[in-house]
Image: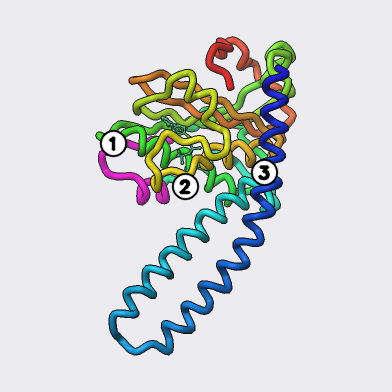
Amino acid sequence: IEEDLRQAQKMEAIGQLTGGIAHDFNNLLTVISGNLEMIEDKLAPGTLREILKEAQSAAQDGAVLTGQLLAFGRRQPLNPKHADLGQLVSGFSDLLRRTLSEDIKLSTVIEGSGLDVLVDSSQLQNAILNIALNARDAMPKGGSLTTTISRVHLDADYAKMYPEVRSGNFVLIAMTDTGAGMTEDVRQHAIEPFFTTKEVGSGTGLGLSMVYGFVKQSGGHLQLYSEVGRGTTVRIYLPAINEKRPQESASDQDTGENQL
Ligand code: ADP
């Protein structure tokens, strides 16, 4: 428990630091990109154009990176709106289909009703995209990615096990891939900023820490379950806004072994 708290404080500090740097850096990148564009307009066709293209594409990559850092540093304020998560998440399926290759089978399962939450839909979309990209990377030979949306009640006993969790009604988005999975060691570090097992250039190690930041900021809860060779499930719990109490309880389906 103390380790969890230390971890959270560490992330908070890194978040503030990176957020500040990213903000200033982003302003510099805007100046660089703007000037490169002006040069492009004035430049006669020739080899310099190639060089210019490279500089522009590097500035673009830099902008993507600072975007991730800004989101991670939580400098992006949330703009929460009332939404039915079944409808909202189903609406992302076109985007996922365009982003993932054909040999990844996609499905969305909506269980029951009472799936209303207050959420920033564009940041939720970003979180889901990040999780889907990780699933893609874990399934280079194809597989399936299943997203299930349901309503659960986290009870007091469950909340006691995890200091960050408060009991109550939540809407759960569970995304399960049939990919390579993670070792317990990797799973424990996966949400840390800059932790990556991917090659330089193909992973920043910020995807899951962004997801974590967004979920925490939304009053929710994030869990990773994974088994090497079988796959990974990322669970996002967002507070349900409808106070109706369902019968089911999440505590009996969670073994506590693989919790984050
Ligand atoms: P990145 O994808 O840039 O490496 P993330 O924070 O998104 O950064 O993920 C951190 C690490 O967690 C990954 O490098 C990978 O080792 C592991 N990971 C995340 N999602 C999955 C998944 N679905 N399957 C297997 N490993 C994963």
* Image-based side of 223 in relation to 50, left or right: right
Dot 3 falls on a residue whose secondary structure is helix
Q: Which of 174 and 227 is in front in this view?
A: 227
User: Which amino acid type corresponds to the residue marked 3 in the rendered image?
Assistant: Gly
| Mark whose residue sits in front, 2 or 1 | 1
The quadrant of the rendered image in which ligand 1 is seen is: top left
Residue 129 magenta-highlighted: no
Q: Nearer the viewer, residue 218 or 66?
A: 66
As displayed, is residue 146 above or below residue 27?
A: above
Does the numbered disc 1 mark a residue whose Cβ is under 8 Å from ligand 1? no
The picture places residue 186, in percent across and down from the top left corner, at 47, 25
Image quadrant of residue 239?
A: top right
Question: Would you name the residue on which mark 2 appears?
Answer: 92
Residue at x-position 39% and y-position 75% = 52
Q: Distance between the residues labelled 2 and 3?
A: 28 Å
| Mark whose residue sits in front, 2 or 3 | 3
Question: Would you name the residue on which mark 3 appears?
Answer: 15
Which span of residues is magenta-colored? Answer: 94-108
Image quadrant of residue 171?
A: top right
**The C terminus lies in which quarter of the figure?**
top right
The picture places residue 116, in percent across and down from the top left corner, at 64, 38
Circle 2 packing at 10 Å, graded few (<14), some (14-19), many (20+), is: some
* Image-based side of 129 in relation to 85, left or right: left
* Image-based side of 225 in relation to 7, left or right: left
The number of numbered badges drawn on the structure is 3
Residue 97 magenta-highlighted: yes
Rendered image: mark on residue 129 = none
Dot 1 falls on a residue whose secondary structure is loop
Question: Would you name the residue on which mark 1 appears?
Answer: 140
Residue at x-position 50% and y-position 29% = 234
